[in-house]
Image: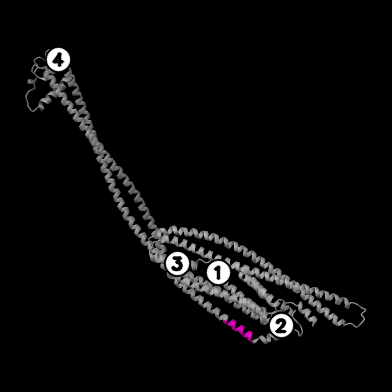
Amino acid sequence: MLIFLALAAVAPATAVSPIEKIMEMISDLQAKIIGEGEVAQKEYDEYSEWCEDRSTKLGFEIKTGKSEVEELKATIEEETSSAAALSTKIEELSNDIQVDEADLAAATKIREKEAADFAAEEKELTTVISMLERATSILSKEMAKGGALVQLQGVTSITDALSVMVSASALSSADASRLTAMVQTEQSDSDTGAPAAAVYESKSGGIVSTLEGLSDKADAQLDKARKAESTSTQNYQMLKQSLTDEVKFANKDMDAAKKNLAASQEKKAGAVGDLEVTSKDLAEDIETKSTLHQDCMDGAEEFELATKSRGEELGALATAKKVIAEATGGAAEQSYGLNQVSFLQISSGTGGAAVRFVRDLARKSNAPALAQLASRMQSAMRMGAAAGEDPFAKVKGLITDMVATLEKEAEEDATQKAYCDKEMSETTAKKDELTAAADKLSTKIAQDKSASAKLKQEVATLQNELASMAKAKAEADKMRADENATFKTNSAELKQGIQGVQKALSVLKEYYAKGDKSHSSADGAGSGIIGLLEVCESDFTKGLTEMTAEEESAAADYKAYCKEDELANTMKQQDVKYKTKEAAGLDKNVAELSGDLATVTDELDAVSEALDKLKEMCVAKAEPYAEKKARREAEIAGLKEALEILEGEAALIQKAAKHTLRGARRQ
């Protein structure tokens, strides 16, 4: 029996029986089919969501396209009318400019002729006045000397007087001729018609008076001509300024009209090009929407058929697994019993596979909660075994509670997603109908509000995660302290036991090695005791080694967990800081832009507010729902598999206990 126990202590792990291998293969196949179904479900959900989003987007694009087509047509008509009006205006302004320029040219020509006539008249009058003044001066000087010229005695007319003055070389013949012509003109214009000779009979002074009168008339005529010239010049300048201003402003208006005409034609050309592109896009959107529904229905039908086929396969596998489990238990026990398994070997590894599986799962999924669960499972098994209690009950409870928690969270997320999908779809559709008048401003505000709400939700989520991490860290610290204290106590006891066994072996070996015993000693029994003590020493040493290795592994895991927790904590705090700052900036932008939306209706405000609340609740998540769902389902499947591993270990121990050699005790 001692030899059997010694061999069993170092025996390899129990081989898996064919029945167990078959059950394992069926379970693996079921898991594979379930995984494929989950992947297909995820793909179908994404495809269905895409169909719905695509249909909504196409409807909105068609509606927008029709509106843009109508707007572009109206723009083309408006610009065509505007171009025609501008062309007419340019033609009218051109005609007005030509008329004004022609009037100015005619007025300038008339003014030049008037100026020439005035210059000639002024020259003539100036010459006459000069001659009159000279003739008057000559006569006045002669009279001042003592009387008139001797030749002037007896003259009867100014003509004769002038002739005498010419003969006396007092006046040139040309000047005399002009004065004579002027006097004759005055005589012909006189109303009396009496001859002028009677006035001048033997009186040279009468001639001077007559010449002075003619000079005064010439001066008056010259003054009148000059005033008329000044008035004409002033009138011409005013007319010229008026016509010049009219031409200037008409040219300015025509330049503006030509510029507006070019802009209108350019805008019309752009609208024509945009209309062609928009009409083409609208036709494509209408055609795409007409085929989208059928494509989505075909995809749904294919998914339903594949799901039904997988369900049938899973049903067949479940039936086969149930039949094997119910019908082959006794035969498997008889053929592949556990009578070769050492009870010591089983007890030394109790629950280890499940703990390692959960720890590996935590590392793969980077889930601190699963890492903490693995540590709690290990501590529960170790403490329960030390206290003589059933460790599996507590561990099962821990795993079951975690599975229930994850399933509850999954159900809550799924319910919320369905509600969010429905409400978001309905509210968004209603908002699209109401935001036509304020689309540009409201889009920007909605984006900023959504981003701000998302950031705030992410900040709240991060703060909750920080609180959860702090709580988990405190629990991990306490658990690590308890584990370390338990290790110190148990390792001290094992070390003490090893020392006691070694001391006993030394005493017995020394005694039975003596050859001169004074009595017949029980050497055979002593050898058996020594052999059993050596087995105990080996078991104690192995237990201490495994315990130390587990302590070192737990310490390393705890250290790694602390490092990851510290890094994650720092990153999340930085995220909280930056996201809070960014959210504040977005809120400021929203406040500034909100002033431009004073004309938005009350109904649009209510819908926008409801949509913002839905976005805060549904959209602004730290992790997408599909990814979170896949991760949680993987964790739940892993925990269920850990439960199966744990139940297999418990069954293994129970079967092994039935085959334990009588009298053997668990060490």
Considering only order in the chain, which callout, 2 or 1, is on the residue closer to the N terminus? Answer: 1
Which numbered disc, 2 or 3, marks the residue that appears first in the sequence?
3
Q: Where 66 falls versus 665 (above or below)? A: above
Q: Tell whether 163 sits left or right of 623.
A: left
Mark 4 highlights which residue? Answer: 143
Residue 163 position (above or below residue 436): above
Q: Nearer the viewer, mark 1 or mark 3?
A: 3
Circle on res. 611: 3
The residue that disc 2 covers is 656
For the question of whether residue 283 can be seen, the reply is: no
Q: In the visual, does 613 lie left or right of 370? A: left
Q: Does dot 3 land on a helix, a strand or a loop? A: helix
The amino acid at mark 2 is: Ala
Is 172 contained in the magenta span? no
Q: Label 1 is placed on what type of residue?
A: Glu
Query: Crowding near pointer 4: few (<14 within 10 Å), some, many (20+)?
Result: some
Q: Label 4: state its secondary structure.
A: helix
Camera-side mark, 1 or 2: 2
